């Protein structure tokens, strides 16, 4: 039955024995209390991606992020050669420092300093308090004592991460581990033509992560996106990945999938618009000419399969980097807003188009991405509703659903470890 | 005709320009949802055979310096790409079962 070889244990899942093969309990997606535990044990402890360096093209370029999962808003800013992050909060009386019109909305721009809208205190790009309105009215105020509260911020290959722990347990590079060693050197920085989407989804954040980290659903849920004859074949074949890997207990993992549609072996396999434009879900059929993809970093195409199409790297807890064989990539963020609601952000990164043809091909890839994501997104709200009934609480996940299994397990492990740590602290204190 | 939106070579598509030469994906997607299948089919049938001509025409220019009528042509064909999904895949303007789901394009290239 298997078209692609599996590990000697007989399955990908059993290759990682600590995962188990038992049905998975989804109480973790329908409990408000559990969400609070996730915030404390995971989101407030680990590195979180907040964007890419291209979003900060100049000294003074900044953007804000509203992060419900850590109960704060932050400013990310470029100060000369460093990227810095601060809590978006004025030291005087706590006004939100950078915002426009609606305090809950994210903003971006370029500035020389940050000026509070309330009483005009000013902060430099390094976070130092530089100006206090009517400074002599204050009592023993030393400006040096009132900088913006900084947030740990590190970058890897242009990806910007922040960490809200008082002292992060590990550096960003150690945190990324095999994701970093596997992808370092990929020309991410050359893919500067971006298209970004966002949606508020009425489902737990892990459910979208689950949906985009398994392709078992693809031949069924997305069947109408293929031409009819092809869709029948795809369903009979089902989905099998070329390769899976999980990186220790980091929670990170990768699923490597086949391509074959860009270009397809037989043009009749794809829709007319794809034939005409030579592009589709897998991206433009020709690799971008200006970008050197002759030598890929070691983490890509881990099975070294000639039919390789894309690798989806899950970066725990809520970030995904998806690299396509055709030379472009995608990122996803799943930002929790409540136990049953999250903000999904998807972004496509292409090499800059040379002309209208390149641009139109990228547009087809982008529109196709959106059509798929809409199918995935609506399924999630339906799942959330039925999970809430608790009529069924445990669900059998198959071998192709190893990444969802790993995500739920890692979340549970982290919460357990965090609780154990806190209990120790409490018992020492009493 | 002074009010034409598209280059003369594409006079056959001029009747679609006002409705479909739209600047943003949000506008194009909204126009798609507001259209009937016969309308989408008509656009598709008329424009898809002209895609290759349109791209050959547009490729003469720098992408970031398109004359206005060329930019309208580009945007018209962005709409054609969008409308191809109802016509080729869904048989309805909306993605099936997408109900209230939405995905807002919040950041797109100028052209
Ligand atoms: S709260 Fe910012 S200056 Fe007063
Ligand atoms: Fe999907």
Image (cartoon, coloured by chain):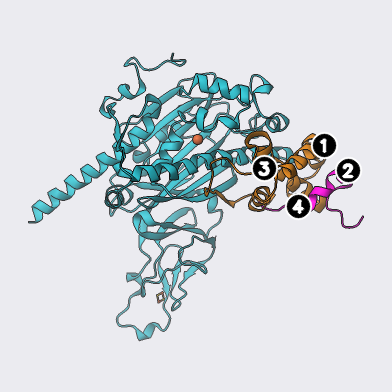
Chain colours: A cyan, B orange
Q: Are marks 4 and 3 on the same chain?
A: yes
Q: Which mark is residue A354?
A: none
Q: Chain of mark 3?
A: B
For image coordinates 32% across by 22% down, the residue present is: A15
Do circles 2 and 1 both sit on a common chain? Answer: yes
Q: Is residue B15 magenta?
A: yes
Q: Earlier in the sequence, mark 2 or mark 4?
A: 2
SS state under label 1 = helix
State the quadrant of the N terminus of chain B.
bottom right
| Most distant residue in the bottom direction | A137
Residue under label 2: B9
Disc 4 element: helix
User: Of discs 2 and 4, which sits in the foreground?
Assistant: 4
Q: In which quadrant of the rendered view does residue A137 lie?
A: bottom left
* Front residue (pair A311, A340): A340
Cα gap from disc 3 to disc 2, whole angstroms? 23 Å
Magenta stretch holds residue B40: no
Beta carbon at label 3 within 8 Å of ligand 2: no
Give the number of the disc on residue B19.
4
| Range of magenta residues | B1-24
- Give the numbered dot on residue B53: 1
Q: Which residue is mark 3?
A: B82
Decide which of tag 4 and tag 3 comes sooner along the chain: 4
Q: Are marks 2 and 1 in contact (CB under 8 Å)?
A: yes
Residue A174 vertical placement versus A44 (above, below): above
Which of the two discs, 1 and 4, labels the residue nearer the N terminus?
Answer: 4
Q: Residues within 10 Å of mark 2 (few under 14, many from 20)?
A: few
Can residue A234 be seen by looking at this rendering?
yes
Q: Nearer the viewer, mark 3 or mark 1?
A: 3
Task: Estimate the x, y position of residue B39 in percent, counting from the top left.
Answer: 74, 45
């Amino acid at each position: 039955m298997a078209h692609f070889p599996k590990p000697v244990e007989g399955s990908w899942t059993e290759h990682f024995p600590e995962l188990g093969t038992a049905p998975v309990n989804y109480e973790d997606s329908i409990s408000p209390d559990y969400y609070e535990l996730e915030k404390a044990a995971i989101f407030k402890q680990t590195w979180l991606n907040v964007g890419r360096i291209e979003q900060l093209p100049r000294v003074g370029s900044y953007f804000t992020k509203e992060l419900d999962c850590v109960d704060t808003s932050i400013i990310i800013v470029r100060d000369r050669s460093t990227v810095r992050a601060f809590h978006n909060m004025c030291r005087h009386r706590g006004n939100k420092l950078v915002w426009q019109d609606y305090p809950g909305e994210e903003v971006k721009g370029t500035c020389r300093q940050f000026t509070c809208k309330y009483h005009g205190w000013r902060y430099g790009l390094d976070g130092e308090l530089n100006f206090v309105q009517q400074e002599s009215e204050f009592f023993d105020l030393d400006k040096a004592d009132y900088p913006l509260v900084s947030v740990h911020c590190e970058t890897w290959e242009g990806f910007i991460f922040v960490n809200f722990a008082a002292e992060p347990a590990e550096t960003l590079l150690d945190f990324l581990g095999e994701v970093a060693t596997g992808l370092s050197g990929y020309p991410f920085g050359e893919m500067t033509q971006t298209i970004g989407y966002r949606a508020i989804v009425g489902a737990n954040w892990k459910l979208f992560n689950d949906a985009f980290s398994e392709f078992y659903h693809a031949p069924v849920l997305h069947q109408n996106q293929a031409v009819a004859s092809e869709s029948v074949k795809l369903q009979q074949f089902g989905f099998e990945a070329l390769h899976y890997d999980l990186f220790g207990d980091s929670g990170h993992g990768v699923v490597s999938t086949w391509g074959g549609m860009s270009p397809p072996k037989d043009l009749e396999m794809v829709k007319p618009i794809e034939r005409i434009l030579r592009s589709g879900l897998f991206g433009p059929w020709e690799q971008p000419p200006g970008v050197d993809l002759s030598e890929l970093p070691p983490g890509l195409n881990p099975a070294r399969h000639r039919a390789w199409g894309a690798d989806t790297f899950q970066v725990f807890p809520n970030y995904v980097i998806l690299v396509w064989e055709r030379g472009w990539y995608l990122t996803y963020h799943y930002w929790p807003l409540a136990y049953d609601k999250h903000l999904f952000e998807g972004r496509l990164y292409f090499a800059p188009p040379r002309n209208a043809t390149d641009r139109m091909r990228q547009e087809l890839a982008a529109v196709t991405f959106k059509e798929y994501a809409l199918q995935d997104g609506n399924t999630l709200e339906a799942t959330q509703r039925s999970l809430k009934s608790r009529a069924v609480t445990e669900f059998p996940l198959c071998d192709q659903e190893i990444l969802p299994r790993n995500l739920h397990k890692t979340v549970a492990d982290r919460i357990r470890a965090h609780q154990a740590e806190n209990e120790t602290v409490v018992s020492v204190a009493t | 005709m002074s009010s034409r939106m598209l280059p003369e070579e594409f006079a056959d598509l001029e009747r679609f320009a006002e409705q479909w030469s739209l600047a943003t994906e949000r506008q194009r997607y909204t126009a798609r949802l507001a259209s009937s299948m016969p309308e989408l089919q008509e656009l598709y049938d008329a424009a898809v055979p002209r895609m290759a001509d349109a791209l050959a025409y547009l490729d003469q220019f720098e992408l970031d310096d398109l004359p206005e009528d060329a930019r309208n042509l580009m945007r018209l064909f962005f709409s054609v790409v969008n409308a191809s999904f109802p016509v080729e895949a869904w048989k309805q303007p909306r993605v099936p079962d997408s109900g209230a789901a939405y995905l807002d394009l919040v950041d797109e290239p100028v052209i």
